Amino acid sequence: MATNTRVAVSQILRNKDDTVEEDDEPKKKSREDWRKAKELEEARKAGTAPAAVDETGKDINPHIPQYISSAPWYYGTSGPTLKHQRPQEDREAQFTKLDLYYNKGVTASSATKYRKGACENCGAMTHNKKDCLERPRKIGAKFTNAGIAPDEFSQPDLNLSYDGKRDRWNGYDPAQHKAIIEEYQKVEEAKRELRAKRLEQDPTATEEDELEGEDEDKYVDEVDMPGTKVDSKQRITVRNLRIREDTAKYLRNLDINSAYYDPKTRSMRDNPIPEAAESEYAGENFVRFTGDTRSHATAQLFAWEAHAKGLDVHLLAEPTKLQMLQRQYEEKKDQFKTQVKQSVLDKYGGAEHLQAPPRELLLAQSEVFVQYNRDGTRAGAAEKQLAKSKYDEDVLINNHTSVWGSYWRDGQWGYKCCHSFIKMSYCVGEAGKSVVMDVPEAITQKQDRKDEKSEKSSSSSDSSSESSSSDSEPDTRSKTEKKSKKKKNKKKAKKKKKKELKKEKREEDKLKKALEMEERKQKHADYLLSVDERKRPYNSMMQVKEPTEEEMEAYMMKRRREEDPMSQFM
C-alpha cells in the first residue's frame, strides 16, 4: 500500500524546476502562429473550414466570442470546449422526479396488539406518549390492547424545482381518467339501447336518419368556452385592439367637446364628425345599432328565454324554427295587449283621450334645438339634451301657479302668484298680493311713531339737564321740585367721589403688590446668578402671561438704569 508522506513546499518547487517539461506551460505563440489561428477562425466563420469539436463530439459555433469559448487556465482543458459554460453537475440541485408527490387519501391499517416502542397512550408507532395528541386515556393502550390508533403517514420531503412548483398536473394520477372514460361508455351504451328500441318500433328507419337529427351545434352554449357564457361575472372581455396603420379614434376630431373617447376600453361610442355626410368611422354605436344587429340580438335573447322555459331551440342550429316561434310569440303578445286594452275601454270608456295628438304638438314647443334646410331635411345632428338639475323642476304645489323663488323683495324669496314669503304655504291669489302690500305700510307707520316718541324723550332729558346746570329756570316749576333735584344731584356727586376714591385705593394696592413681586423676582434672579449653573432649577412649570399695567409700571420703577451715573449711589 502507498503511504501519504508529507513533503515541504520548497522541496516540491525544487523538484518541479528540475523535472520541468515543455508541455507543462503553454508556449508563447509566434507571429506566424497568430496569423494562422486568425485565418482559421475567419475560415470557420465563413464556413469554408470545419468547425471546432469539443470532447463530446459536438460542433462549437465559430461565432461565439473568445471570452466565452476560451476556458480559464485553472479548468484544465486539453482542447476546445464549452463545458465550463454549462451547468456543473456537482453544483446542480437534485430535484424530485415527476412520479413522486404527496400521497392523498392514505388510509393506514391499525394494529390489533400493542407493539414495543409504540405510544403508551394510543398505541401508534410514529410518536411517543409525550408527543401524543389524543385525549389522555385512563388506562393506556399498552395495558388494554384495545383501541390502538393507526400510525400517522409521514409525507415525503419534496424538493421541487421552479417549474415543478408551478406544474398544474403535478401529482395527477392518470388512473383517474378511467372514470371519465367509463362515464362516456355508459352514455354510448344508453344511446345504443335507444336506437335499438327505435328500430324495433320502426324497422324502416335507418341510423343515418337518426344521426341527421342530432346536430352538434345545438350544444354550443353548454360548452364552457370563453365568451359563450351569459353570466356577466364569468364573461371574459377581449381588448379592442387596432391595426397601427389605421388612424386613431381620438385623432379624427381634435375638438374637446366632440365625442368622448374612453382610453381604458379604447372605445368611442358617438360619431366624432357628426356634420360630415360620409365618413370612414361613424362611432361604435353606429355599427352596433345598424343593419340586422338589433334583430339578431333580440333573437338571441328570445332563444335564451325559450331555452330557460324548456323549449329546445337554438339560434345557430335552427334559425328558421326560432324565427317562426318569435313571430308567433310577437303576434300573440300584440293580440293579448289589444284585447286587454279594448276590454278596459269597453268597461270604463275614454277612447277619445287616446286619440289626442302628442304633447309636443299641443304645446307647439320643445327644448331641443333642431335646424332644418329649405328642402325640409335636418341640417346637422341634433344637439344632446343635457340634464338641467337632479331636482324636480316646474312642480306646482298648493294651488300655486308659479314656483318658489319666482318673486323677490327686501332680501326674501317667495311666490310670484300671491307674493307669499312662506314656503309650502297655500296660494290665495290676488287677495294675498293686496294683504302683503298693505302690511308693510302699517309696519312703516308704527316704526315712524316709535322713532318720534324716542326723539321726544331724548329732547326732554336734554332740556332737564340744561335747566339743572343753568341758573335760569322757568317760572312754571315749583320750589319743591328744585330742592328735590338739588338733593339728588348732591347724592350723585357724593357717590361718584366715593367710587373714584375706591378706584384710586385699589390701584394703589395693586401697584404696591406689583412692586413687592418685582422686588422678589429681582432677589430670586440675583440668587440664581450666584448659584452654580448645574444646581439651577428648571422653569418648565412657569406660566407665561401678558403682564398687567401695574406690573409694567413696577418694572419700569424698579429696573436698573446702567446709563444713569447716579444709579450707583441709590
Image (spheres, rainbow, N blue to C red):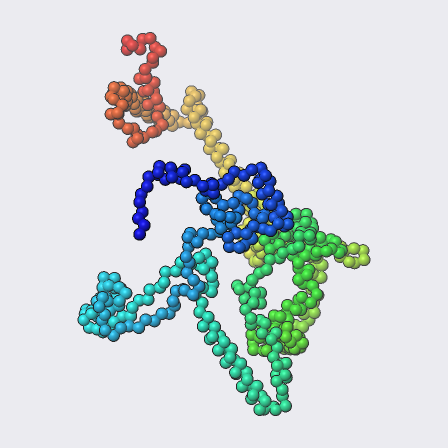
Could you tell me which residue is drawn at 68 percent across and 60 percent down?
286
Q: For the view shown, which residue lies furthest in the right direction?
A: 375
- Residue 368, image quadrant: bottom right
Could you tell me which residue is drawn at 50 percent across and 80 percent down?
186
The reply, left or right, for residue 394 in relation to residue 469 is right
443 versus 303 height, above or below: above
Closer to the camera, 192 or 471? Answer: 192
Closer to the camera, 185 or 467? Answer: 185
Could you tell me which residue is drawn at 55 percent across and 64 percent down?
235
469 versus 263 height, above or below: above
Q: Position of residue 366 (x, y in %)?
A: 69, 57
Q: How many marks?
A: 0
Closer to the camera, 305 or 27? Answer: 27
Q: Visible in this render: residue 115?
A: yes
541 versus 164 height, above or below: above
Q: Position of residue 318 (x, y in %)?
A: 64, 76
Could you tell me which residue is drawn at 67 percent across and 66 percent down?
293
